[in-house]
Amino acid sequence: MPAYDEIFEKVQSTLVDALGVDEDDVNRESTLQGDLGAESIDFLDIVFRLERNFGIKIPRGELFPENLVADPEWIADGKLTSKGVSELKARLPFADLSKFEADPDVEKMGDLYTVDMLVQYVQSKLAA
Amino acid sequence: MRWIWIDKFTEFRSGQFARAIKNLTLAEEHLHDHFPGYPVMPASLIIEGLAQTGGILVGEAGEFAQKVVLAKIPRAEFFGVACAGDQLTYEVTLTDLRAEGAVVDAKAFLDGELLCDSEIVFAHLDNTRANQIFGPKNFVFTQQLLGVLDLAKAQQRAKELDAGAGADGEANGPPAASPAE
C-alpha cells in the first residue's frame, strides 16, 4: 500500500487540477473551502478525480456527506451540541475534530474538510 | 433566437461518445457584434455547443430522467478562431458517470484541426428539490433541444430503410453508430 506521502502528492496534484491552485498552496492542513477556495460543485469534481487517479470507488456521500447536520436538534445557539459533535465524528471519521470540539461553531464546519482528511480517506480505501 | 448551439448529430454512441456539427452563418446576429467586420464565433458559445452535445450524451445515458446541468469547466484551451462560413465539429467522450453527475472530455475541431480542448463537469439536480423549485417538467431537455437528436435518429432510420436494412426493432432504439444511430 502506498505511504502517506505518496498519497499526499497524488491528492495534491488532484487538487491542483480540480481547483486551479498552486501546488505550494496545498498543504496537509489546508482547508478545501477556506484555504483552497473550493465550492460545493468542486466536491463532485474532486470525487471524480480521486476515483480516477487512485482507482477507487467513492460511494455517494461517503467522503462529503450531503447533509452534515441531519437533525436540527444537533444545533443550539449556532453551535453543535455534544450529541451533534459525536454524530459529526461518525459521519466524518477521517476529519480532525480536536480544534473544532473546543468551539463547535456550525459556521466553522467547512474547515473540517482538509487535505489531510482526503489523504486519510484515500489511505483507508486503498487498504480495504 | 433559439438557444440551440449544435445543428446536427453525426454520430451518437449511447453512454460513450457523440459528434455534432455547428455551421456558422452570417444570419446569426451575434457574429455581427463579435466583431463588426470580423465575424468570430465567441469561445463561450463554442463551449455551450460542446456542453449541449455532452449534456445530451449524459442525459440520454440516464434516459433523460435527470435534470443535467453544466456545473463546471475545469479546463478549456483554445488554439484558434472560427469565422462565418466555417463548420465546427464537436466531439465529446463520456469519461465518468455517476448518480451525482458526469464528466466529459470535449473537443472542437475546424477543418480537422483541434480548435478547443476542454473538460466539462455536469451535475444531476436533486429531483426532489428541483421539482419543488422548477416543477416536474425537465427544463433542461426541452423538446427543441432534443429535436436535434430526434432528427438524427429519423435521418438514420430513413437511410436504413433506403438501404433496405431497416428493421422495426432496431429503428426504435437509441442512436448507436455512425451516423447518429
Image (spheres, coloured by chain):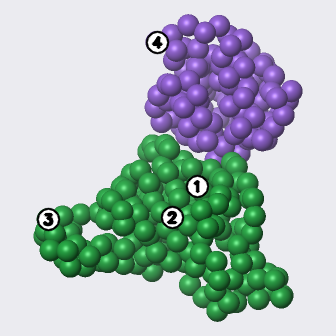
Chain colours: A purple, B green
What's the distance in space between the residues labelled 3 and 4, CA to CA?
A: 45 Å
Q: Can you see residue A95? A: no
- Crowding around mark 2 (Cα neighbors within 10 Å: few <14, some 14 to 19, many 20+) is many
What residue did someone put label 2 on?
B53
Q: Tell me which label, 3 or 2, sits earlier in the chain.
A: 2
Depicted B23 relative to depicted A121: above or below: below
Say if mark 2 contacts mark 1, CB within 8 Å.
yes
Q: Nearer the viewer, residue A125 or B9?
A: B9
At x 56%, y 7%, the residue is A1
Res B76 quadrant in image = bottom right
Label 1 sits on residue: B106
| Tag 4–tag 1 contact (CB < 8 Å) | no
State which mark lies toward you, 4 or 1.
Answer: 1
Residue B51 position, x and y percent, is 57, 62
Q: Amino acid at mark 1?
A: Ala
Q: Is residue A94 above or below residue A70?
A: above
- Taking the image as shown, residue B54 lies to the left or right of residue B110, namely left
Q: Please report, as a chain letter, where disc 2 is located.
A: B
